Amino acid sequence: MDLTTPSGTREFLLLCLDGRKKRTAAQLVKVLELQPTFADAVDVHAPDLAMLRRQVEEARTAEAKAKGAADRAEKVYATALESWIRTPAVGGAQ
């Protein structure tokens, strides 16, 4: 396995796809996430793929931040809802 050349990297990744344990390309992406050395080798030899990998990472980061913000907003809403339910306004809208 020679990850220092494009052909060596391709040969290795082809084995990962078609070897004893067959994988889809999507499954291979998951393997590369767990093995940054291999992903880094792809980045070196295929800068266009490196850009796509960064886009995936950025999207996942944004998604995680959005989920965190949504979770916090939901907790605030739930607290306010419970407060509204348990504390009827005197003389106000009910």
Image (spheres, rainbow, N blue to C red):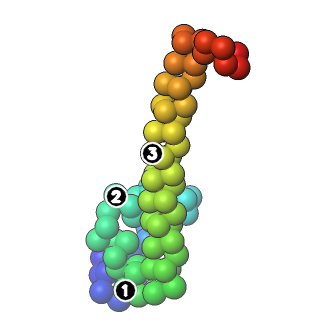
Please tell me which residue lies in front, 8 or 45: 45
Q: Which mark identifies residue 60? A: none
Q: Which mark identifies residue 68? A: 3
Tell me the crowding category of disc 2: few under 14, some 14 to 19, or many 20 or more residues within 10 angstroms, Cα based: few
Asked if residue 27 can be seen in this view, the reply is no
Task: Nearest to the eye among marks 3 and 2: give it.
Answer: 3
Residue occupying image coordinates x 66% and y 14%? 91
Q: Which amino acid, by three-letter code, is at mark 2?
A: Leu
Residue that lies at the very extreme toward the right in this rendered image: 93
Q: Which mark identifies residue 44? A: 1
Image spot of residue 67 (x, y percent): 50, 46
Residue occupying image coordinates x 49% and y 59%? 62
Residue linked to disc 2: 34
Residue occupying image coordinates x 34% and y 71%? 38
Image spot of residue 53 (x, y percent): 47, 72
Q: Secondary structure at mark 2?
A: helix
Tell me the crowding category of disc 3: few under 14, some 14 to 19, or many 20 or more residues within 10 angstroms, Cα based: few
- Is 29 drawn above or below residue 85 in the view shown? below
- Is 37 drawn above or below residue 48 in the view shown? above
Q: Are marks 3 and 2 in contact (CB under 8 Å)?
A: no
Please tell me which residue lies in front, 57 or 20: 57
Q: Which is more N-terminal, label 3 or label 1?
A: 1
Q: Secondary structure at mark 1?
A: helix
- Is 77 drawn above or below residue 2 in the view shown? above
Separation of disc 3 and disc 2 at Cα?
24 Å
Left or right: where 21 falls relative to 93: left
Q: Which amino acid, by three-letter code, is at mark 3?
A: Gly
Task: Nearest to the eye among marks 1 and 3: give it.
Answer: 3
Q: Quadrant of the C terminus?
A: top right
Q: Which is more N-terminal, label 2 or label 1?
A: 2
Q: Which amino acid, by three-letter code, is at mark 1?
A: Val
Image spot of residue 6 (x, y percent): 41, 87
